[in-house]
Amino acid sequence: MEEVDLSIVSQAIFRYANGRNIWAVKGGLGAGKTTLVKHLLASFGSSVHVSSPTFSLINEYVWEDHGQSRRVCHIDLYRLESLDEVLDIGIEEILDSEALVIIEWPDIVEELLPTNCLRIDIQEDTDGRIIVVL
């Protein structure tokens, strides 16, 4: 199978997102969720260093793009076990913000996500990865 160019996939996702600012990214361990986020932000004009928020839970990235400030909140909920824990980190305020919010392992907050949330599912088959955007 031919390797997929994630920068092209990222640009397509941005076009498909059509201004939606809350994105839920699903995929198993090692599926490439954070790698996809790195490519997404690069496609968005960012040169910030993107790292997994597995232990920090939330990484916030801010940069200037043609005189406009851009803000992304990258959240990883893998280690949290209850909705109360997620509420304790201030998820409601983040979801209500103007930032682009990208959530890895979003199942625990499904009831808080808007119906128009962009959903990205990274599935693995025997030949590699398949990225599904819903």
Image (cartoon, rainbow, N blue to C red):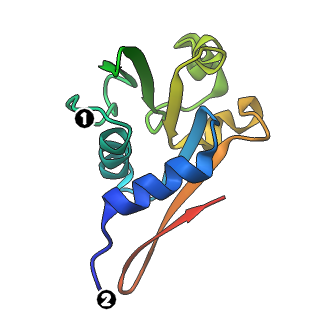
Q: Position of residue 6 (x, y in %)?
A: 33, 61
What is the three-letter code of the residue carrying label 2?
Met
Residue 73 appears anywhere in the view: yes
Q: Is residue 20 left or right of residue 71?
A: right
Q: CA distance from mark 1 to mark 2?
A: 28 Å
Residue 30 appears anywhere in the view: no
Residue located beneath label 1 in the image: 51
Q: Position of residue 34 (x, y in %)?
A: 34, 46
**96 shown above or below 30:** above
Q: Quadrant of residue 97?
A: top right
What is the three-letter code of the residue carrying label 1?
Ser
Q: Secondary structure at mark 1?
A: loop
**What is the residue that sits farthest to the front in this orientation?**
66
Q: Is residue 52 left or right of residue 11?
A: left
Mark number for residue 1? 2
Q: Residue at x 20, y 31 (%)?
A: 49
Q: Quadrant of residue 72?
A: top left
Q: Nearer the viewer, residue 61 or 34?
A: 61
CA neighbours of label 2 inside 10 A, class few (<14), some (14 to 19), many (20+) = few
Q: Residue at x 75, y 41 (%)?
A: 116
